[in-house]
Image (cartoon, helix red, strand yellow):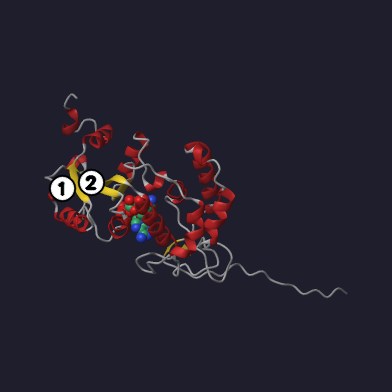
Amino acid sequence: AVVGIVMWRQPPQHQEWKGAGTTAHFYEIILGRCYTYTQIVRPELGHKDCQKIGKAFTNAFLSKDPCGSTEQDYEPLMELTNQTVPCDKTLLWSKTNELVHEYAWVQRELFTLENTLLGYMADGLRWCGDPGSPEMNYQSCPDRRTDCSNNSVSVFWNTVSKRFAEDACGVVHVLLNGSVHNTFDERSTFARVEVFNLHPEKVHTLQAWVMQDIRNISSDSCSDASIKNLKLILSKRNITFTCENNYRPIRFLQCVKYPEHSSCRSKI
Ligand code: NAD
């Protein structure tokens, strides 16, 4: 008789977190987005090695504690994805996710973080690993409020947002939302990371465009208390601040969606 030892392969036992798990097909998505970006969106980056970039991305978080993520974990990925954004073309945003990308789609020379390779690859995705397994955790990932703030996704966005701001030069633009309570929100990535990593030797001005919901236009958002706070922070950092309410080119985009609204009806 043949005496065999049967080894049962246990399904991976992952820790349970409060947040949703890794996006299904994460690896295939980032790899596909890397090729789309470097071959089609910006063929001048066609020399980038997407296989290597994909591996560096997953190596940053696989087999690691998803609540102990660090900037250093993402360092190899950052080195492989460096990219130059021309001066005057950096566009930051906070609480205007849809509108800012509509505008960047039309004004092709402007770059939001999501119009750079790494932001393009990761936008809208979730990911985390587990110290006890070489695989991604598709069941759950840390929620940044209830589990931990230094989770693999938050540390990634803090790290790439920091580099994006450090690399900016000339006039930097920011699209803010004048229809939310804190137009300049001190807890946002824009406030915590980007404002403090603009280099005053390279960035002379931050120009804010503060857009209000077209269905709900109120008074001057640039004189809002939170905007005064932003102005003060920048003056201490030797960066000039300018602010414009309801910037007309972006208002026109809002009018595409609500063409019958009174503020859209006047003949141009
Ligand atoms: P925001 O509050 O509108 O947040 C934008 C998006 O990023 C939201 O989906 C939010 O859930 C997510 N986000 C923000 N901080 C996060 C964190 N610490 N961990 C995980 N997700 C986070 O605006 P914001 O916080 O000022 O971020 C926008 C600015 O920062 C932009 O200028 C951009 O360059 C950069 N950024 C982009 C993303 C992104 O998802 N594409 C995420 C963070 C930061």
Q: Residue at x 69, y 71 (%)?
A: 8
Q: Who is closer to the viewer here, 52 or 145?
A: 52
Task: Give the answer, above or below, for where 161 lies relative to 98.
Answer: below
Task: Give the answer, above or below, for where 105 lies relative to 203.
Answer: above
Gap between marks 1 and 2 measured at Cα: 9 Å
Specify whether residue 231 is in view. Answer: yes
The label number, if any, that marks residue 208 in the structure image: 2
- The disc labelled 2 sits on which kind of residue? Ala
Q: Who is closer to the viewer here, 33 or 47?
A: 47
Q: Which image quarter has ligand 1?
A: bottom left
Q: Which residue is mark 1?
A: 222
Quadrant occupied by the N terminus: bottom right
Label 1 beta carbon within 8 A of ligand 1: no
- The disc labelled 1 sits on which kind of residue? Cys
Specify whether residue 179 is in view. Answer: no
Instruction: Identify the secondary structure beneath mark 2.
Output: strand
Q: Who is closer to the viewer here, 253 or 224?
A: 224
| Corner quadrant of residue 252 | top left
Q: Residue at x 41, y 55 (%)?
A: 160
Q: Position of residue 75 (x, y in %)?
A: 48, 60
